[in-house]
Image (cartoon, helix red, strand yellow):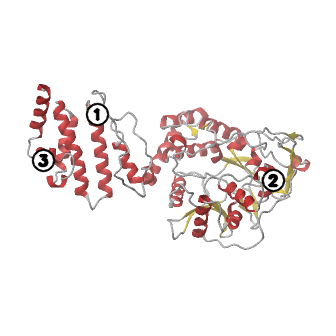
Amino acid sequence: MNKIKSLQVFYNDKKVGTLALTKNNIVAFEYDNEWLNNGFSISPYSLPLKKQVFIPKIDPFDGLYGVFSDSLPDGWGRLLVDRMLNSQNINLREINVIDRLAIVGETGMGALSYKPEYSLLENKDYQEDYDSLALSCKKILNTEYSDDLDNLFRLGGSSGGARPKILTKFNNEDWIIKFPSSSDNKNIGKLEYLYSLCAKKCKINMPETKLFPSKISSGYFGVKRFDRKKSSTDTIRKVHMISVSELLETSHRIPNLDYNDLMQLTLNLTKSFEEVEKLFRLMCFNVFSYNRDDHSKNFSFIYNEEFEKWELSPAYDLTYSYSINGEHATTVNGNGVNPDLKDILKVAENIGLDKKKAENIATEIKEIVKKDLELFLLNKIEFPKGAYYEDLGTIYKLLLASEKICSSNQIYYCYFMRNEAAITKSWSLNKFSDMYHFYNEIFKAASKILTDSLMLVKAYYNNGLVYLLMKLYEEGKENTDIYSTILKELSKNKIPPNYLSGYSNHMKYILYRVNFLKIIAKLKVKLGKNR
């Protein structure tokens, strides 16, 4: 492709200014005179409305101001661009950021467009079949090629985010439809759709969403674009938007943001506590719904041209997410690991929100999320902190969350006991309590799912309980609450002893049923001491 040295930047049909490539590959920007008289600052902190040449730093956007970097595709979109360039034998090393903006042209997210435009496509018609597109996306993620590359690029080459998506029309309006990535569950679309419905219940500002039908999955998540607005004359106007990452000129890949910072930024930019409250609701939802991929590119502001003011954009990319190391990308009052109501209310206090109102909002959202998303939040799988036998309380959750389970006769894990005082040899009431708690937790969860195999579930439960009962006798801890609880559970869930055939504690259960277990346990201890 021909080398491009400069680009004209437009907002709808108005010229905003000029981008020019300098000798050291930094892209300078200057506002147009007419825009200086009648326009607005497209990036308030970096590009104030002044007559001057603005020179960005090389980092973090490769010599580009953040507001223009927002126009560039990343993730899936960048992959498609690179594949298209490769297919046309264009060396990627010779392509700079201003070339990529020319490829974006008028198709980018937000309102900014760039001229001259460089097209990588021929003009021809394409068919949109969502299942076919989803399969093509999967193919291109796993291989270098796809027969449908042109179509995928036309529909999604200017998009951002990691997941494959298309920018399309539905009912003559602009929509985004997402497809599973190579690491996603095939039904990820339904999950995001249910999250969007729950967010709306929580009074979070959300665009219209829809679950588009599929023959190979539960459906594809679609969201109406909020950067496109239909006027009274049915013409489409672009809406200017800028992400927090690009507004602050910082990479979203570096987790350096806290909700305290976001709140202050929102108040400074919008001058509105209504917008601050919108962000507060979104923060609460992200915390309680386990959406931990709340990085700085997943928050944006839009410019309201009619009222000449900035507003928090509608929420987007809301779904269950473990993120990096299980932490929130944006910390909550400094806590990214497991923020709670105390952290949430501290953020509210710091920005000046009414404490009682903030607490009511947080409590309401927590209850709605628990009710609507509990099934998905079961996938919040972490080792319980400070508990004994944490693997017992974790592995069953992994099994329940898995679509497929494979077994092997190969031994992958073993250890040698060197310390007689290790936790596997010593017992305490906390240890008894934790172990019982996990066995009881598994029993209740399995009883809900394996309704046709309740005797099998009870067999597993009794096998664990009678093991604990034997240890309680051996440790002389009969006068404890946990002892009484286990006896009650064993009595309540009695089954014929033959159902435990093949279990490690089958004989212990028989001895329990004939009231000999305590005698044998005490005899075992006595013989051990005499030895």
Residue at 37% across, 46% down = 395
Task: Identify the residue at image location x=51%, y=71%.
Answer: 215
Look at the image and tell me in which quarter the N terminus lies. Answer: bottom right
- The residue mark sitting in front, 2 or 1, is 1
Q: Amino acid at mark 2?
A: Asp
When asked about the image quadrant of residue 87, the answer is bottom right
Q: Residues within 10 Å of mark 3 (few under 14, many from 20)?
A: some
Task: Tell me the kind of residue under disc 3.
Answer: Ile
The reply to whether residue 306 is in sight is no
Mark seen at residue 510: 3
Q: Around disc 2, counting alpha carbons within 10 Å, would you say few (fewer than 14), some (14 to 19), or many (20 or more)?
A: many
Between marks 2 and 1, how big is the CA–CA gap? 63 Å
Q: Circle 2 sits in a helix, a strand or a loop, which is it?
A: helix
Are the residues tagged 3 and 1 within 8 Å (C-beta)? Answer: no
Mark 3 or 2, nearer chain start: 2
Q: From where the camera sits, is residue 465 visible?
A: yes
Q: Callout 1: helix, strand or loop? A: loop
Disc 3/disc 2 C-alpha distance (Å)? 78 Å
Nearer to us: label 3 or label 1: 1
Q: Which residue is mark 2?
A: 99
Q: Position of residue 44 (x, y in %)?
A: 77, 41
**Label 1, residues with CA under 10 Å away: few <14, some 14-19, many ≥20:** few
Of the image marks 2 and 1, the number of the one nearer the N terminus: 2
Left or right: residue 482 compared with residue 368 = left
Q: Which mark is residue 424?
A: 1
Whichever of callouts 3 and 1 sits on the residue coming sooner in the sequence is 1
Q: Secondary structure at mark 3?
A: helix
Q: Which mark is residue 408?
A: none
Residue 412: x percent and y percent?
A: 38, 45
Tell me how far mark 3 sits from mark 1, CA to CA.
25 Å
Q: Is residue 71 left or right of residue 335?
A: right
Amino acid type of the residue tagged 1 in the rendering: Thr
